[in-house]
Amino acid sequence: MQNFKLNRELAHLAVLQRTELLGKNLKKLRKLFGRYLFTVLFSKYFINPNKISKNYYHLMEKEFFLIKKYLKKEDRVLSIGSGIGGLEVLINKTFDTNTFFIEKNYISKKIKYGWDSKNQEAYNNLNLLADFLLNNGISQKKFSLFDFDKNDLPDIKFDVIISLYSLDYHYEFSLYEDYLKKIMKPESVLIFDTIRPEYFNSIFKNVEIIKQDLNTVHKSKRIVCRNF
């Protein structure tokens, strides 16, 4: 597999979640006409789904190789704010994982920079997420979807928790802190991006920096944490 199966609707959702998938012309339209028109018009009808699919696959492949060593066969994985699930597809195909997704189920009309203290910003659709996972070879019995606003969150122990550019990047870690304490074992791995990596040295016994993004709006670092 060198790309994902991605129709126009899913490609539209992917570029809202990952603006680095956009070409130069669409980025210019976004700046020129504003984020609302970009969200409802340009990002839907001015994209090439095949090109987005290939770019998205290669982007998720890079993310996968970065965290691959922290996963093992048949891990129980929790993904918070996964997007359409490309990374999780690659993880499942390699490690035969059982993956649980916690997501919001709507698309915000405006983009907020910095923390959204009420966790109201969202760019996802749970039906489309399920379609993507099934269409790209993940068995229905290998994943579970949870709407953050409607469902009780899964109350089980996880081996790996992943939240790329979501937890402590768009909203504060404290919104999930008590929940994470319940579902993590001492050896569980939590992987996420943050603008304040030094803060977590006082929360976890082990914090490892595995990636730095210094040329983005939010200069962030990806960290791997163990043992509250």
Image: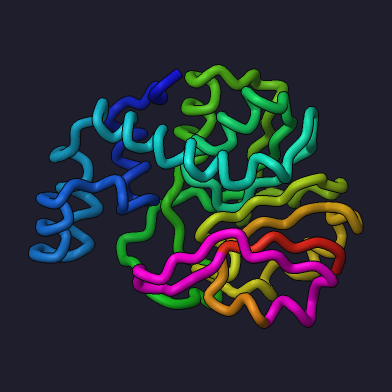
* Lateral position of residue 156 relative to residue 68, left or right: right
Q: Quadrant of the C terminus?
A: bottom right
Q: Position of residue 29 (x, y in %)?
A: 10, 57
Write down the quadrant of residue 44 in the picture.
Answer: top left
Vertical relation: 194 (above or below) 199: above
Q: Position of residue 16 (x, y in %)?
A: 33, 50
* Lateral position of residue 49 relative to residue 157, left or right: left
Vertical relation: 38 (above or below) 171: above
In the image, 122 versus 75, the foreground residue is: 75
The stretch drawn in magenta includes residue 52? no
At 72% from the left and 57% from the top, the residue drawn is 190
In the image, 126 versus 161, the foreground residue is: 161
* Lateral position of residue 48 relative to residue 73, left or right: left
Q: Position of residue 219 (x, y in %)?
A: 44, 74
The stretch drawn in magenta includes residue 215? yes
Vertical relation: 162 (above or below) 109: above
Q: Position of residue 81 (x, y in %)?
A: 55, 52
Residues in magenta?
199-221
- Residue at the outermost right position: 186
At 87% from the left and 48% from the top, the residue drawn is 157
